[in-house]
């Protein structure tokens, strides 16, 4: 072990840490026992955000190293296969019963196989001598530039916190909120690239989970190989968990709107979204926490054999649910359908037209006026004929259906969802016929 690696291992062993939702939440704890409440919470939030971003950088380095090793392993498998074919041809040539034609054919095939083997060996040698995004086959991922930069940056940006408040529920909340920042940033970057937000969020969450699991395994004295195995499993768990459409499978907020049966204001909509975010954060934190415990415990890699499957789940679920509810209530729900839907701009445009066509006194939407507003806008002309037909058909269905009065009193946001979502068209038809 090199001196630099020993220093990193000593720092990991000596630092106190807390985990929420399987993510690392701090690198350095304060020596001041009486720090004020606000600086302590700000430090925890910042340390958690920086720590999760650093874990994502480490996880990226681990993934790059895995790809480099996988390429080398693939080249070796191909070389072994070629060697086996050559051995079979040479064994066939040793048969004394072969006639001249068969022997000549086998010799030509043998020559071709040897030429291919030489070219493949030269190519594999160049790959071994070169680098794949800074990683050499069989290299140490902790020496990758991403890994070293993430670790040094995390240590440089660490803020002091009050260790006497480690078990404070508000501390857990701020730590979990900070851990969500890089994940949300990944979703925002995906939207800028015209990719669904869930793709970026899932990739960042998987990378952060991988880097955290790798460091945790080394802290518990696991071998580098076991730490890499834990990182691979944690990457899969983190990515899959973040991508789970929990709020679509369990649409608690939408069910509450249907129970309420009347248009809701801003507070009602915020509470509905908060319910969706609460369920989303709680379920994801439970799945991720249990999976991380399984990886660490005897069921998985086994670097912490005393860990039970439910250890720390209550804190993780509580913090994850509260953070999910808070973010969702602000309109940026983690995993919320409206936040990650690729047609969010079109839905907002339709919602604006419906809102403009609503009666100020009753809140009922005039579908004819809404359609005229949409047709007069520049965006209408940029839509393809199928989109125009769907919107026009949906609004006429609202106008002429037996349930027109009930439909027109729906919240503009809900009507916009029904009109712009393909599955919403079927729901709209069912509501109009009185089946729903």
Image (cartoon, rainbow, N blue to C red):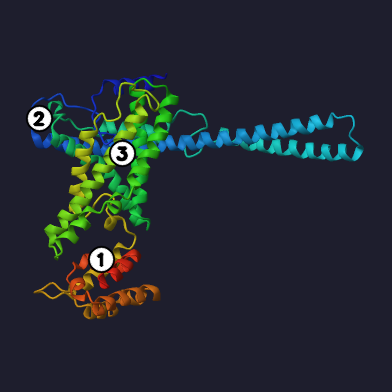
Give the number of the mark in front: 3 or 2.
Answer: 3
- Which element carries disc 2, helix, strand or loop? loop
Question: Would you call the spot at circle 1 few (<14 residues within 10 Å), some (14-19), or many (20 or more)?
Answer: few
Q: Residue at x 33, y 35 (%)?
A: 55
Count every numbered label the image shows and give the total: 3
Tell whether 376 sits left or right of 137: left
Residue 294 spot, x, y in % from top left: 35, 30
Q: Please name whichever residue, 429 or 265, is drawn nearer the observer in this view of the structure.
A: 429
N-term-proximal mark, 3 vs 1: 3
- Which element carries disc 1, helix, strand or loop? loop
| Residue 81 seen | yes
Tell whether 121 sits left or right of 17: right
Within the image, what quadrant is residue 286 found in?
top left
Residue labelled with disc 2 = 35
Residue 368 spot, x, y in % from top left: 23, 81
In the image, is residue 143 above or below residue 381? above
Residue labelled with disc 3 = 287
Give the number of the disc on residue 436.
1
Mark 3 and mark 2: Cα distance apart in space:
34 Å
| Residue 143 seen | no
Q: Residue at x 42, y 34 (%)?
A: 232
Mark 3 and mark 1: Cα distance apart in space:
33 Å
Q: Residue at x 31, y 20 (%)?
A: 10
- Which element carries disc 3, helix, strand or loop? helix
Within the image, what quadrant is residue 49 found in?
top left
Question: Would you call the spot at circle 2 few (<14 residues within 10 Å), some (14-19), or many (20 or more)?
Answer: some
Q: Residue farthest to the front?
A: 435
Give the number of the mark in front: 2 or 1.
Answer: 1
């Amino acid at each position: 072990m090199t001196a630099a690696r020993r220093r990193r291992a000593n720092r990991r062993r000596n630092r106190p840490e807390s985990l929420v939702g399987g993510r690392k939440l701090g690198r350095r704890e304060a020596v001041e026992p009486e720090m004020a409440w606000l600086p302590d919470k700000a430090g925890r939030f910042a340390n958690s955000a920086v720590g999760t971003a650093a874990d994502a950088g480490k996880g990226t380095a681990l993934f790059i190293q895995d790809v480099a090793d996988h390429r080398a392993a693939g080249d070796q498998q191909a070389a072994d296969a070629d060697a086996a074919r050559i051995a079979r041809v040479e064994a066939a040539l040793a048969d004394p019963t072969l006639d001249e034609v068969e022997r000549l054919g086998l010799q030509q095939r043998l020559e071709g196989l040897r030429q291919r083997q030489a070219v493949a060996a030269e190519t594999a040698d160049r790959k071994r001598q070169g680098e794949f995004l800074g990683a050499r086959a069989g290299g140490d991922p902790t020496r990758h530039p991403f890994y070293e930069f993430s670790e040094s940056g995390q240590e440089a940006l660490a803020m002091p916190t009050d260790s006497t408040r480690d078990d404070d529920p508000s501390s857990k909340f701020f730590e979990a909120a900070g851990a969500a920042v890089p994940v949300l940033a990944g979703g925002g970057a995906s939207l800028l690239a015209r990719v669904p937000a869930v793709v970026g969020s899932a990739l960042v969450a998987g990378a952060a989970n991988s880097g955290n699991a790798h460091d945790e395994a080394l802290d518990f004295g696991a071998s580098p190989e076991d730490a890499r195995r834990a990182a691979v499993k944690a990457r899969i768990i983190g990515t899959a968990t973040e991508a789970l459409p929990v709020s679509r499978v369990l649409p608690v907020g939408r069910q509450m709107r249907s129970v309420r049966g009347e248009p809701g204001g801003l507070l009602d909509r915020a509470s509905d979204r908060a319910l969706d975010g609460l369920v989303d954060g709680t379920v994801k934190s439970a799945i991720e926490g249990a999976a991380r415990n399984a990886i660490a415990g005897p069921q998985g890699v086994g670097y912490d054999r005393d860990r039970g499957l439910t250890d720390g789940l209550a804190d993780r679920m509580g913090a994850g649910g509260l953070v999910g509810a808070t973010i969702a209530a602000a309109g940026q729900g983690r995993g919320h359908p409206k936040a990650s839907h690729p047609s969010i701009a079109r839905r907002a445009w339709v919602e604006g037209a419906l809102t403009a066509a609503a009666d100020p006194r009753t809140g009922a939407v005039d579908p004819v006026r809404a359609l005229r507003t949409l047709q007069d806008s520049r965006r209408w002309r940029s839509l393809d004929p199928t989109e125009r037909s769907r919107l026009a058909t949906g609004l006429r269905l609202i106008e002429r259906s037996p349930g027109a009065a009930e439909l027109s009193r729906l919240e503009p946001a809900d009507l916009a969802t029904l009109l712009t979502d393909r599955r919403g068209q079927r729901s709209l038809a069912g509501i109009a016929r009185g089946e729903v």
